[in-house]
Image: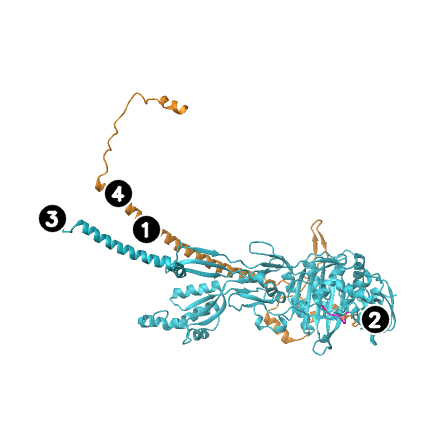
Chain colours: A orange, B cyan
């Protein structure tokens, strides 16, 4: 229904009548057209060339960065290995000994709730536990050469009568 | 421009052009059919092969760490450096095209390269020169297991100097920063048979080789003479790195235990020794030491006998430490209490042979506690005879004897335990630790279970394992079972405390401030070659503190010369290790004095 009614409601459709189509103004001449065409072609080619160059450049850059990443990964691995080496108990013992520290098997505890010291502190000299203090290979060799039983090797257990305990 | 070129008739021209174009089109079409239609698959494959390169991405072998994350074994990127002497001779130039200057440079190359090698790798200059100038070859191995970064530096230095001829072959290297530490547990690796990577050949490296190795990946990409084609096809299957294992071992404690054990074995001039420190409450091994041992970095230089882990592979007769297990069975089956009175004669006959005590005595009156304190074989036999012998064997089985503990280390021995229908004299023998064999880990776990309120926890050495992307991997877990009642456990501890605190043991192995319970063992050692007794195994086990047993230390010394008693040979090491372990784990000193209960009557 409404479709039939619709045209009649258009405004300004009735009064003005037909108008002539305006002629195309100033159509592009042959030469400018060719120049523009050539321009587009050149621009396209240059663009393509630049894109290609850029992609190549980036590919080189990627390769360079990958190489750098590998190099740094290698460096990291080497440094990690060094850290691991330095963190070994044997190395820590060596460093501590070099600083004049000795292991203390008679540690005491502090009760953090009331500050009480649990246990009796003792002075240690480093020979309380045989062989626990770091010795260099040279020192060990020297000791083996000396081959005399060291006094600290004597344990309380050795001095008591034997044979009562199988 | 007035005259036109004579181009003939336009129709003709058109016809000729059409024919020529037609011919060309036909040729092209024919070629296209040959290439694309008839042999397309083969051609495509050929082209792809020319363009695409694939390489294997080696998976990193998993790391092994101690309980605190300290690295015990890890893999590093490394290379094998190889030289091409033919290339070095001309410094990479074509011999015919060399100028006088090039020849000069090439002549100096071996010396210059050797200098660089010495500065980065150490070693002997002349040896390098000899290798670099070896005639008639294009392949000389200069150095193996060189850190990849070190090689990179060498390579950069040489290209700065303008020399060529050194190449690398990638080969990951397994490093054990701690050297000999826990090497018997970790094991070692060897180069795999196919030349790619390494395979575990001992210890955990062997037992968990599959998981540690990971899965190799691959990369496939298209390439041109100028390198990778940026827009080309690129298929990357990343390598799956190996599983990382965290052990229950404590590297710091392990170090001290190993040092102390070494001293013990050397002092006793013994063949070997084992020391174990264990968390009584969980069955976790805190230290597991062997001596003599080896360096996991260079297993090739070690004696084959020292490459294993004696604590799990070697079975021996435990001697009097076994009395702890016997007493546990006796108390739990209600046969005795620590105060049970026994008249102990000077000897007792068993299977037609006399059994004696290590200390000569006339008839003495001992309590069951006194029998343990004095380590009386006769008393132990007399008490054990009051118990059903099959039941005794069943108890020993429940303590884990006669079967592997399943802690995941390779080559675990089962030991030998007589069947439940054992002869009477065998029963007498096993009651004091002869006539049956155990591994150190079995014996330590059994004692730990007995003193742990009677709950046996199977020992573990692997705490956890995770894949590269953090997923947990199943590892052997501790299984718990009640083996004796809490009351019986307390009674056994009472008897073991008398070893330390009674007048027999007077201050023999006390640890300042702590109440400890212990037992020594001295066993004759069966010689597998002559099937006879030859030499001794001295051992000592102890737990502390008695009020709440937390840590167990077991020291076993094989074939000591001179003193042979466990209380002399192994006890001092036990004492020191226990002292260190208690302090390390913050076990507070005992607040009560040691019980001194009657050992005689």
Cα separation between marks 2 and 1: 101 Å
Cα separation between marks 1 and 3: 44 Å
Cα separation between marks 3 and 4: 33 Å
Subunit of mark 1? A
Say what secondary structure mark 3 lies in: loop
Say what secondary structure mark 1 lies in: helix
Seen from the viewer's position, the closer of residues B517 and B222 is B222
Q: Which residue is mark 3?
A: B3
Say what secondary structure mark 4 lies in: helix
Instruction: Tell me which corner region of the image, top left, top right, bottom left or bottom right, holds residue B114.
Output: bottom left
Same chain under badges 3 and 2? The reply is yes
Same chain under badges 3 and 4? The reply is no
Query: Is residue B434 on the magenta stretch?
Result: yes
Instruction: Tell me which corner region of the image, top left, top right, bottom left or bottom right, holds residue B202.
Output: bottom right
Residue B306 versus residue B329 in the image, above or below = below
Cα separation between marks 4 and 2: 118 Å
Cα separation between marks 3 and 2: 142 Å
Cα separation between marks 4 and 1: 20 Å
Q: Which residue is mark 1?
A: A49
Q: Is residue B262 left or right of residue A84?
A: right
Q: Mark 3 or mark 2, which has the lower sequence index? A: 3
Q: Mark 4 or mark 1, which has the lower sequence index? A: 4
Q: Which residue is mark 4?
A: A36
Disc marking residue B378: 2
Closer mark to the observer between disc 4 and disc 2: 4
Q: Which residues are magenta?
A: B433-438
Q: Evaluate whether residue A158 shows in this view.
A: no
Q: Position of residue B334 (x, y in %)?
A: 84, 61
Q: Position of residue B533 (x, y in %)?
A: 74, 76
Residue B458 versus residue B88 in the image, above or below = above
């Amino acid at each position: 229904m409404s479709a039939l009614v619709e045209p009649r409601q258009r405004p300004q459709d009735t009064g003005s009548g037909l108008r002539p189509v305006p002629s195309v103004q100033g159509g592009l001449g042959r030469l400018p057209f060719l120049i523009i065409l050539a321009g587009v072609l050149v621009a396209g080619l240059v663009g393509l060339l630049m894109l290609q160059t850029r992609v190549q450049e980036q590919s080189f850059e990627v390769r360079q960065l990958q190489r750098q990443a590998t190099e740094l990964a290698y460096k990291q691995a080497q440094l990690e290995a060094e850290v691991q080496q330095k963190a070994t108990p044997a190395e820590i013992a060596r460093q501590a000994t070099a600083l004049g520290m000795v292991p203390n098997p008679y540690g005491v505890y502090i009760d953090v709730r009331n500050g009480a010291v649990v246990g009796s502190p003792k002075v240690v000299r480093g020979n309380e536990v045989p062989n626990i203090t770091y010795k260099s290979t040279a020192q060990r060799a020297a000791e083996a050469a000396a081959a005399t039983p060291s006094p600290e090797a004597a344990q309380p257990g050795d001095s008591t009568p034997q044979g009562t305990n199988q | 421009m007035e005259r036109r070129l004579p181009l003939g008739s336009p129709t003709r021209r058109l016809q000729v052009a059409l024919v020529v174009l037609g011919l060309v089109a036909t040729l092209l079409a024919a070629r296209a059919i040959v290439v694309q239609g008839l042999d397309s698959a083969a051609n495509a494959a050929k082209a792809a092969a020319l363009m695409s390169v694939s390489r294997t991405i080696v998976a990193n072998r998993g790391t092994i760490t101690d309980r605190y994350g300290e690295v015990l074994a890890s893999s590093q990127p490394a290379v094998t450096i190889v030289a091409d002497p033919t290339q070095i001779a001309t410094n990479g130039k074509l011999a015919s095209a060399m100028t006088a200057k090039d020849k000069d440079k090439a002549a100096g190359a071996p010396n210059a390269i050797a200098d660089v090698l010495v500065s980065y790798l150490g070693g002997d200059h002349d040896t390098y020169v000899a290798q670099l100038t070896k005639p008639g070859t294009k392949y000389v191995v200069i150095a193996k297991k060189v850190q990849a970064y070190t090689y990179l530096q060498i390579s950069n230095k040489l290209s700065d100097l303008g020399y060529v001829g050194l190449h690398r072959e990638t080969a990951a290297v397994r490093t054990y920063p701690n050297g000999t530490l826990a090497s018997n547990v970790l094991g070692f690796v060897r180069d795999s048979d196919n030349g790619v990577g390494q395979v575990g050949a001992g210890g955990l490296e062997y037992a968990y080789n599959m998981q540690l190795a990971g899965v190799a990946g691959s990369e496939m990409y298209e390439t041109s003479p100028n390198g990778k084609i940026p827009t080309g096809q690129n298929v990357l299957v990343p390598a799956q790195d190996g599983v990382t294992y965290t052990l229950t071992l404590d590297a710091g404690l392990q170090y001290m235990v190993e040092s102390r054990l070494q001293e013990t074995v050397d002092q006793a001039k013994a063949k070997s020794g084992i020391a174990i420190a264990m968390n009584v409450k969980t069955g976790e091994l805190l230290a597991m030491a062997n001596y003599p041992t080896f360096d996991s970095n260079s297993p090739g230089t070690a004696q084959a006998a020292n490459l294993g882990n004696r604590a799990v592979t070697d079975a021996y007769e435990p001697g009097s430490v076994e009395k702890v297990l016997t007493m546990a069975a006796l108390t739990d089956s209600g046969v005795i209490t620590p105060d049970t009175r026994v008249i102990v004669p000077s000897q007792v006959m068993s299977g037609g042979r006399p059994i004696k005590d290590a200390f000569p005595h006339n008839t003495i009156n001992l309590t069951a506690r006194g029998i343990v304190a004095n380590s009386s074989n006769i008393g132990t036999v007399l008490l054990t005879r009051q118990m059903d012998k099959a039941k005794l064997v069943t108890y020993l089985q429940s303590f884990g004897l006669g079967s592997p503990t399943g802690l995941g280390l390779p080559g675990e021995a089962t030991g030998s335990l007589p069947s439940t229908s054992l002869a009477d004299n065998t029963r007498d023998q096993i009651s004091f630790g002869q006539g049956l064999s155990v591994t150190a880990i079995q014996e330590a776990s059994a004692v730990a279970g007995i003193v742990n309120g009677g709950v046996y926890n199977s020992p573990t050495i692997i705490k956890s394992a995770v894949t590269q992307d953090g997923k947990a991997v199943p590892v052997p877990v501790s299984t718990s079972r009640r083996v004796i009642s809490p009351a019986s456990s307390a009674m056994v501890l009472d008897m073991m405390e008398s070893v330390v605190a009674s007048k027999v043991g007077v201050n023999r192995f006390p640890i300042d401030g702590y109440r400890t319970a212990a037992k020594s063992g001295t066993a004759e050692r069966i010689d597998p070659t002559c099937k006879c007794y030859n030499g001794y195994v001295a051992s000592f086990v102890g737990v502390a503190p008695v009020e709440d047993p937390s840590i167990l230390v077991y020291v076993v010394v094989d074939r000591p010369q001179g003193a042979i008693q466990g209380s002399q040979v192994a006890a001092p090491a036990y004492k020191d290790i226990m002292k260190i372990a208690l302090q390390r784990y913050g076990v507070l000193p005992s607040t009560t004095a040691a019980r001194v209960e009657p050992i005689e009557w």
